[in-house]
Amino acid sequence: MAATSRHQLIDGLRVLQAAETGTLFKQARLNVAMCYPSPYHVGMSSLGYQTIYREVHAHPEATAERVFLPDDVDAWRAVRAVPSSIETQKPLHQFDLLAFSVAYELEVTGIFELLESSGFPALASARSEAMPLVVAGGPLTFSNPDPLEPFVDVLLQGEAEDLIAPLLDAVLAGGGKAAVLARLAQVPGFRVPGLSAESTRGFVCKATDGRLPARSQIVTPNTELRSMFLIEPERGCSRGCHYCVMRRTTNGGMRTVPPERVLSLIPEGVKRVGLVGAAVTDHPQIVELLETLARDGKEVGISSLRADRLTPRLVAALKACGAQVLTVASDGPSQRLRDLVDRKHSEAQIVRAAELAKASGFKRLKVYNVIGLPTETDADIDELVRFTLELSHILPVALGVAPFAAKRNTPLDGAPFAGIDVVDKRLERLRKGLRGRAELRPTSARWAWVEYVMAQSGPEAGLAAYDAWKAGGAFAAWKKAFAARDVRPFEAKRTPDGRRNAVAWPSVGRRAGPLEIPGGGGAEAAPSQVSDWGPLDLKDSAR
Ligand code: SF4
């Protein structure tokens, strides 16, 4: 088959744009490329990315166009096509400011690809004064953006809504890169590597209440969430799960938006609505909101169902909104481990969720879980097997299992990775125990280990990621690169049972010794972040 031509690839961007509703077009003095280091169908499902797109357009002297990592990077490389914008197909190198949104650790390679295929060195120190400023923000900045430092001029940390106008003003004021960076280094929320004080690490900015709710600007059929208008009826969470960066200590916990304001912001003609947030079912008026949406004939997806919040009325409202599958997060293979990480729900509550789902006519139950938590043993996995089989007698069950990778800004910060071999053995134990009676959807232990190293290390891990990407990006390349850069994930001292002792945990402890590099092959390619759990299933984005 003939190779795709450059013209065909650029034409594909026009086709994507033509299918959109809500695209913004504007001429302005400052042209911002809003870069997403994953493909279009992923980036356009990001509410934060869409919100910042609108914020840039709200500035009288700035405009934004979106640039995504190509779906087929090799095809673009083969014909030397340059990443270009969806709006006007303008190549990245013609913009004044490149702003990246980064959701998770492995997306850093998408930054390298977009920059270097556009003729910019990925390393900030190798870019000239004449090249545009490169900034990054997004969900990753809530935990550990340190590995991004060698590649960006500025980090926007935490909720960025209130940082956009100061950023654009500073760039528009001109005076050269050094002057712009010196200005931004003085403003809380911006971290300028090499200029900002050490104390700015870990700072997470909080948007003013008037900025809420975040909501879609563009609706498109070409995403995981097919033509769904996304809106955030609440931000943050009032709970305290020990592994979660969105727990109550982050930016003061949950902030809710009145249902009438949510409803007033849903455009006429929208048929599908996604309610997105860390803990949407904790919203005190979630039932009323869902019932109104159902009465209006909307199909609704919801990002975070908590088993202990499900009532017959809430489950019936979900069903009336078109849901066929009920999804809950269990997040701990046994009650002992759920208690340990303060995941406040019981087996009985999950069983009740399954029974309510069945009674309301749901076809399936999806349960998210995590394995490899500190102190976990085979006995915990056996409990998960027993419990999952019990659930499968109520409804068909799909069990999503992710290996635990500790994150910064959480009480479990500094907890070590369980080990690839350990996780693989536990997954095998789980698979054998379930005997095909529940569908098992595990995340790769190898890539969870890479995520862990990136999540718990500093700028040297970013440099290793760059080496790995240059060497082809397979797992073996990452292992080699981490070893060559002597990457040492942070390890904190822990109490023997994990982290229940408030005095001893979390404690700023020590760095680990040299990283233990796992054995085994390594041609495995990096995974996509997106689950294949269906269009109405908005995965909990908080963890
Ligand atoms: S995991 Fe969910 S319920 Fe727990 S703190 Fe995070 S957002 Fe809240």
Image (cartoon, rainbow, N blue to C red):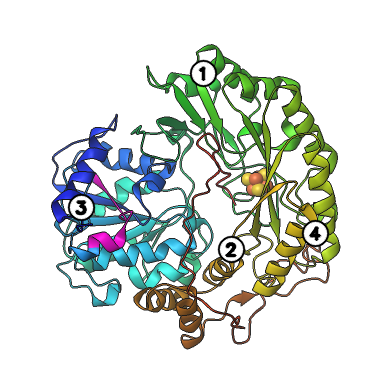
Instruction: Give the numbered dot on residue 84.
Output: 3
- 505 vs 526, nearest the viewer: 526
Amino acid identity at mark 3: Ser
For marks 1 and 3 on the same chain, the one whose residue lies earlier in the sequence:
3
Q: In whole angstroms, how far apart are the C-alphas of marks 2 and 4? A: 17 Å
Q: Nearer the viewer, mark 3 or mark 2?
A: 2
Amino acid identity at mark 1: Glu
Q: Nearer the viewer, mark 1 or mark 3?
A: 3
Which SS class for mark 3? loop
The quarter holding residue 295 reads top right
Q: Quadrant of the N terminus?
A: bottom left
Q: Residue at x 29, y 71 (%)?
A: 122
Q: Which residues are magenta?
A: 65-76
Rendered view: 49 above or below 186: above
Give left or right: position of 222 versus 121.
right
Which SS class for mark 2? loop
Q: Nearer the viewer, mark 3 or mark 4?
A: 4
